[in-house]
Image (tube, rainbow, N blue to C red):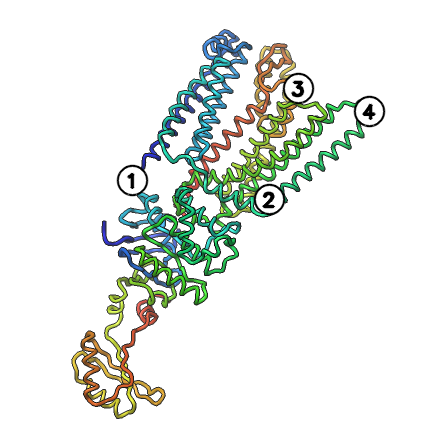
Amino acid sequence: MQTIDARERGIAQAIAWLRRGLLTHVAVTLLVALLGLLAGFQSSPELLGMVRQSLMFNYSGAADAAALLLVLISLANISALLVLVVAIQAHESWVLPGNVLVILANLVLVVWLGCLTGLLTVVFGGLAVASMARVSGLLRSNPVMVRELRGRMRGARAFVVLTLYLALMGGFSLILYFIFGAVNAQNASSATGIIGRTLFTGVVGIQLLLIILIAPSFTAGAITGERERQTYDLVRTTLLSTPSFILGKLESSLAYILLLLLAAIPLQALAFLFGGIGQAELLLAFVILGVTALAFGAVGIYFSASQTRTLSASVRTYAVISIGAFGAPLIALFVLNLLLGSSLVSSGSDAAPLIETTLQYLRLLATSLNPFTTAIDTQALLVEQQVWGVYARTLASNGSTIPMISSWIPFTIVYVAAAAVLMVVTIRATRSNDHES
Amino acid sequence: MSEFIIETHDLVKKFGNFTAVNGLSLQVPVGSIYGFVGPNGAGKTTTMRILTTLTRPTSGGAFINGVSVLDDPRAVRRAIGYMPDEFGVYDDMRAWEYLDFFASCYDIPLAERKKLIDDLLALVDLSHRREDMVDKLSRGMKQRLSLARTLAHDPSVLILDEPASGLDPRARVEIRELLVELAKMGKTIFFSTHILADVSEICTHIGIVEAGQIIAQGSMDEMRAQLQPHREITVTVRDAEAAETVKRTVGGLTGVVNVVDLEAKGGRYRVRIDYTGDDDGVAALNASINNAGVSILGFTEETKDLEAMFMRVTKGIVT
């Protein structure tokens, strides 16, 4: 018997449309993956050709690459729609422009690649936008975020931290420069491109390390901190909704990290002086860093909401991150590399190409579960083949090629989707926990 | 809508084997200042947490403005302002930002907030501390700021858990005056306390809770009548002879239950008259003593203090 006003009805409607869009993309993903498997097992490439003809009619590349792209586009849409569903529950002001942006991106795909599945998002997203547009007063800044940022940016502390951070990064770059200057002087091969690339890699590596340490620590104390300061009940008796509360916490932490990332861009760009890196590298590094902060921050929020003490929330957060994003993928990668070098692949049997293809895709997945391996893989691909998207990989077993993608793409999809799912779970858990205490 | 703005029916809350609230039924009339009195651990805070939608009752019903806290928690939250017993403070905020945050949590548009915050700060007499950091305020000021926070969305009911605990006497009086002021503005105030002076000073209604149950409740007058079988009038006279005259004079009058000699104090003799009549009777009593030729030095009716009431009511239940 909740009082449901026009605003809440509009929001519920928008969520329903987004959810429908999401489900159709799941169906597309499964369908194309199934067709891909069929084509692979029965070795009938015309199946995939049909897919390209009908769903990606403007795409000039290979048919299997078209199928892979199709799956990726659907997965990316699933991630984006999930994020929108979470955000709209929190009445976030960026939902409307975000939704429009997703629709525009899909329109570009439709026109550029002839990717018809993009129309699904255009239609369902458009309906969601229509529902949202009818709701007045949806646009507002999240109260929790405003408050947290006010506190965080107050006084000298925030700027001292920023200065220290930049000084450390600058010092580190300088050390790298001198070391490589000395090494290269001995080798007498003055490849400044290598210096540039090393500087860039070093700075990004340190940033990634910092983010992995900082993002969870910011968020793991976000909700337990409210409990410890005894402000939790105060906020919970206001009209602030659970999604707004939780997303506000995540956003305020991410906003500060974003500031750290933006502040370090000039340092990364220092590498342009020496050459060896391009804008694509800069952009992709930023995406990987940002997505890492988002996902690890979300893990912190999850445990912060389910634990009562900051300490236990932090411990669990770091444990899950080190196992899920480091331990498990790195071990998997190690095993997969062993298998790829084994007789399973080099035996020349009929099954070898299929096994190798499977192992290669599994390796892609394992690579893209860890931000460091993703960054290394993405950069290696950019340096060696100047590729940031789809490319063809030659199989060792029979010399044929399979389509592959740069690992930052699956990394982004998986991490963003994981963050959105974690937020949904956290919101649900918080709602039911509150009533039991 | 009923005349009671807060109502609970047989409210029960169990935490595992421990029963915090055990069939508690209370009624708070619109516009009253209701003192919710009881020893620590009687279930006051738990009851308040149920009323503020923070805790679900194990069984029974709780209603604010006739709306069940279980059916429509958002409507209930809109109607109440809650101040818990511990003062939750964000250490990195100014006084106005503190109010601004909570106002925004209640969906109050940005354009209206500045004036609202000014009004609230003026109401609790903190306008001069507008820019001060919240954690630098004194305890009494924090408590007043907290009270201002509960008013941000103009609720009809204030639910205050121990609003005066831990305050110095001056701050306590200030809070008390504020509560009276708010009641004049038409708010119903439901507050828990174990400081009985607060209750006798300002409350219009009182509920005494013990071991998770209401053992007595009603308006202050009803409670007095209920707990105090007769009025006690003390007559002070100059000497023992006059005291004897007083005893003789009133001894036979109707309504006089008992006449007792009290210990002489400062050379003055005192007689206590237990009387069950009304105010006219009391005046007549005075007149009859006067007519008997006794010069009265003092004629006072003792109001039984609440502590005595409280002790009598709770006797034997708490061990």
Q: Distance between the residues labelled 2 and 3?
A: 50 Å
Up/down of A348 relative to B278, above or below:
above
The reply to whether dot 3 and dot 4 touch (C-beta < 8 Å) is no
Side of A276 relative to A435 (left or right): right
- Taking B275 as reference, is A288 left or right? right
Q: Mark 4 points at which residue?
A: A187
Q: Are marks 1 and 2 on the same chain?
A: yes
Do badges 1 and 3 share one subunit?
A: yes
Q: Which of marks 1 and 2 is in front?
A: 2
Residue A1, disc: 1
Looking at the picture, which amino acid does disc 3 mark? Gly
**In front: mark 4 or mark 2?**
2
Provide the residue designation for mark 3: A341
Q: Which of marks 4 and 1 is nearer the N terminus?
A: 1
* Comes first in the chain, label 3 or label 4: 4
- Mark pair 4, 1: CA separation: 78 Å
Q: Residue at x 61, y 47 (%)?
A: A156
Q: Which of A340 and A273 is in front in this view?
A: A273
Distance from disc 3 to disc 4, alpha carbons, whole Å, reads 33 Å
Q: How crowded is mark 1: few (under 14 residues within 10 Å), some or many (20 or more)?
A: few
Task: Using the image, name the chain to which the residue with label 4 belongs.
Answer: A
Q: Position of residue B116 (x, y in %)?
A: 40, 49
The spot of residue B278 in percent (x, y) is: 19, 74
Label 4 with label 2: CB-CB less than 8 Å = no
Tally of marks: 4
Residue receiving disc 2: A158
Chain containing mark 3: A
